[in-house]
Image: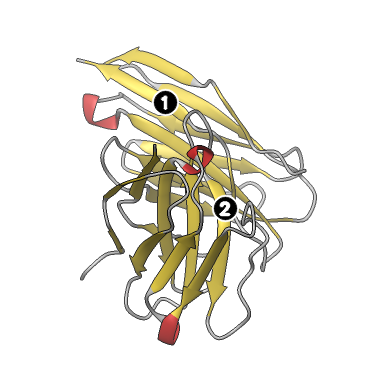
Amino acid sequence: GAGVSQSPSNKVTEKGKDVELRCDPISGHTALYWYRQSLGQGLEFLIYFQGNSAPDKSGLPSDRFSAERTGGSVSTLTIQRTQQEDSAVYLCASSLTSPGAEQYFGPGTRLTVT
Amino acid sequence: ILNVEQSPQSLHVQEGDSTNFTCSFPSSNFYALHWYRWETAKSPEALFVMTLNGDEKKKGRISATLNTKEGYSYLYIKGSQPEDSATYLCAYLGGSQGNLIFGKGTKLSVKP
């Protein structure tokens, strides 16, 4: 079946602009996660959605970052007023249930802020 | 701050060599330990999810062990092949409702 998909695969934007990154999880997966990997760093947790529960936003680095998940499926990560330090690969993952279950990752969106 | 450490940072081996790397994590409030393989230009792919102290898991030539009391896991690759070249990530989960904390990974290069 179809895996996790993300769009766009690459995004170059000017500092100060807003960007939206999209994630389509595997159908039936109730949990959805956003991570990012900056140059030389490990995968950094950003936000986690589980079913209809309030999302765990504890990893969002600033109030310029927000995410929503519509209808328990597609998710959009929005970064407002982008800064150069936002340049990273943004990965989305989904899992059948809780974080204890193995996560299936999308191919990522490479964001470059110039 | 919870820390997950992986060593070595990178490893270069010859085809046919066996190798292993380490993941260290907090021993308190342990719930699960994940291993992922991340090949260049691909998505991270789950290898193992381990939950019990003393767990040993195997998939082909790759195996992993888990010691939750001392907070470490080993990943072993027997008879490395060039297609094993990838970054191997471990991730710790403390509590069933927490989020995964990833290490920075071990980058393995296998020369033919």
| Coordinates of residue A97 in the picture (x, y in percent) | 50, 74
Residue drawn at x 50%, y 28% as measured from the top left = A40
**Above or below — where is B52 with respect to A38?**
below
Residue drawn at x 44%, y 40% as measured from the top left = A87
Other-residue count near label 2 (Cα within 10 Å), few / some / many at <14 / 14–19 / ≥20: many
- A26 or A64: nearer the eye? A64
- Marks 2 and 1: same chain? no
Image quadrant for the N terminus of chain A?
Answer: bottom left
| SS under mark 2 | strand
| Coordinates of residue A77 in the picture (x, y in percent) | 45, 64
| SS under mark 1 | strand
Type of the residue with mark 1: Lys
Cα distance in 3D space between marks 2 and 1: 20 Å
Q: Chain of mark 2?
A: A
**Above or below — where is B61 with respect to A104?**
above
Other-residue count near label 1 (Cα within 10 Å), few / some / many at <14 / 14–19 / ≥20: many
Tell me: A109 left or right of B112: right
| Coordinates of residue B42 in the picture (x, y in percent) | 27, 44
- B25 or B65: nearer the eye? B25
User: Which label sits on residue A45?
Assistant: 2
Q: Are marks 2 and 1 in contact (CB under 8 Å)?
A: no
Image quadrant for the C terminus of chain A?
Answer: top left
Residue B73 shows up from this direction: yes
Type of the residue with mark 2: Phe
Residue drawn at x 64%, y 68% as measured from the top left = A56
User: Which label sits on residue B107?
Assistant: 1
The picture quadrant where one finds residue B72 is top right
